[in-house]
Amino acid sequence: HAARYREMTPKSRKFHERAADVTPLGVESNIRSFDPYPFYTESANGSYITDVDGNEYLDFLLALGPIILGHNHPKVTNAVQEMAEASDITATPTPVAIEFMEKVAEMTPCIERVRMSNSGTEATMHALRVARSYTGKSKIAKPEGGYAGAHDYALQSVHGSKEALGPAEEPNTVPHGTGIPEQVSETVVPIPFNDKGNTEKILRKHADDMAAVIIEPVMFSCGCLKPRDGYHEFLRDLTEELGIVLIWDEVMTGFRLGPASAQGRFDVIPDMATFAKAAGGGYQVAGFGGEAEIMNEIIPPGEDEEGESWNSSAFHGGTYNGHPLAAAAGLATLEVLDGGDVYDHIDRLGNRLFTGLQEAADDTGVDANVQHIGSMGQVYMTDAKIHRFRDTWQANEEQFADWWIEAAANEVIFGNPIQDERFFTTYTHTEEQIDHAIEVAEDAFRAVDHE
Ligand code: PMP
């Protein structure tokens, strides 16, 4: 399946050989690596990425989420250019970052106070520290199969075999790769997403030590696992009862599933939330926020707003926090998103794309289960139901990679060639582009071995 892709990407192959001599795997981030090698990008505009060989890919990867307005949306690009003329970083506060944070707080139901960071990883790391400081407890719970950033505190039970992860009722904590101290793994308790009974048993058992539950509202880190049977309403009530901070990791869903993010879409309000990706329209914007009482843990010891003495001091800092270019990009992005027709457009095209992909798979006799919500979704190569993380194990990863590369060889990229990922629609996509993508997908389904 990769033969045609190889033929059309000779310069990328050369770059890959060169890259492997300077950076492990020849990529800047592990998940950019795939077989036979990734294409190397020259430029990106609107719905398309152009590679160094001049191929133009219709893009549904969309940078793993940030590109909600299409590549190089003029308002975002202009805001960045103007800011670059005005100032680089100064490590002094700027009006543009304050305006951005005001906009985030105005749009996000749970956020009264907010801080900026440069990546989703930093956002979740700092949010967890604040929650630990606020509760005075040390453990955190996260769904098995979930990804909440690349730091040790959350890089646990992300994937794993049945043997390693143990019983579905009470999954084991499994560090994601080596180099993670055992002592850190001991602070993380996996819970089974969409399994209310066992989630409740586990949280009640650890409640006295449990500072926070950090959870994606829709688990896009294992494809597209949607909440069922009031799972989030249940978790909201239970965490409140047990004195556990509920953190929604909205790095993927924030400003993507709607102007008020997933919390607006589902009408469940967590105590804290993270955001990144879509909030920056393609620039390094991320952050976390929540109730003022919780976020004020960040204020160093002294007096609080009422003049009461104050002993906590959950540290949050960073040289690049609130970088003016990022803040300018973020503000311009949120201004386009808020009140415009972006969500109508991307959700409508999302429905068209993902239902079209299911039909294409069905027509070609490939077992596929296409799951989506709004502009985000994934094709699982299985006809099994996908309700819980372990259901995703039934999907055929090799078949997915074959299907992906076949489509890539026809200049359409459906996210990454990894079954655990997901892909998106964006504001610059047109109905014609979606229909073309479905045709390419159908041919690709036909080409994969599914006997
Ligand atoms: N949380 C979730 C839900 C994510 O999907 C990701 C990234 N895919 C992260 C956290 C980490 O964000 P970043 O890659 O910006 O560090």
Image: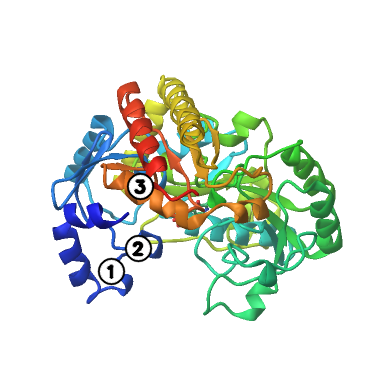
Q: Quadrant of residue 144?
A: bottom right
Residue carrying label 3: 63
**Badge 1 density bin: few <14, some 14–19, many ≥20, Cα 10 Å:** some
Q: Is residue 236 left or right of residue 55?
A: right
**Are the two marked residues, 2 and 1, in contact with CB atoms closer than 8 angstroms?**
yes
**Are the two marked residues, 1 and 3, in contact with CB atoms closer than 8 angstroms?**
no
Q: Which residue is more in the foreground, 222 or 100?
A: 222
Q: Is residue 230 above or below residue 91?
A: above
Mark 1 → mark 3, Cα distance in angstroms: 18 Å
State whether residue 444 appears in this view: yes
Q: In the image, what residue occupies the spot 68% across and 63% down?
A: 311
Q: Amino acid at mark 3?
A: Ala
Upstream in sequence: badge 1 or badge 3: 1
Q: Quadrant of residue 373?
A: top right
- Looking at the rendered image, the quarter that the N terminus falls into is bottom left
Give the mark toward the camera: 1 or 3: 1
Query: SS at mark 1?
Result: helix
Q: In the image, what residue occupies the spot 42% across and 27% down?
A: 346
Q: Say the numbered circle drawn on residue 33.
A: 2
Q: Say the numbered circle drawn on residue 415.
A: none
Q: Position of residue 59 (x, y in %)?
A: 31, 40
Q: Position of residue 443 (x, y in %)?
A: 35, 38
Upstream in sequence: badge 2 or badge 3: 2
Q: Is residue 156 left or right of residue 281?
A: right
Residue carrying label 1: 26
Q: In the image, what residue occupies the spot 64% across and 80% down?
A: 182
Q: Position of residue 80 (x, y in %)?
A: 24, 41
Upstream in sequence: badge 2 or badge 1: 1
**Badge 3 density bin: few <14, some 14–19, many ≥20, Cα 10 Å:** some
Q: Position of residue 93 (x, y in %)?
A: 37, 49
Q: Is residue 127 left or right of residue 235?
A: left
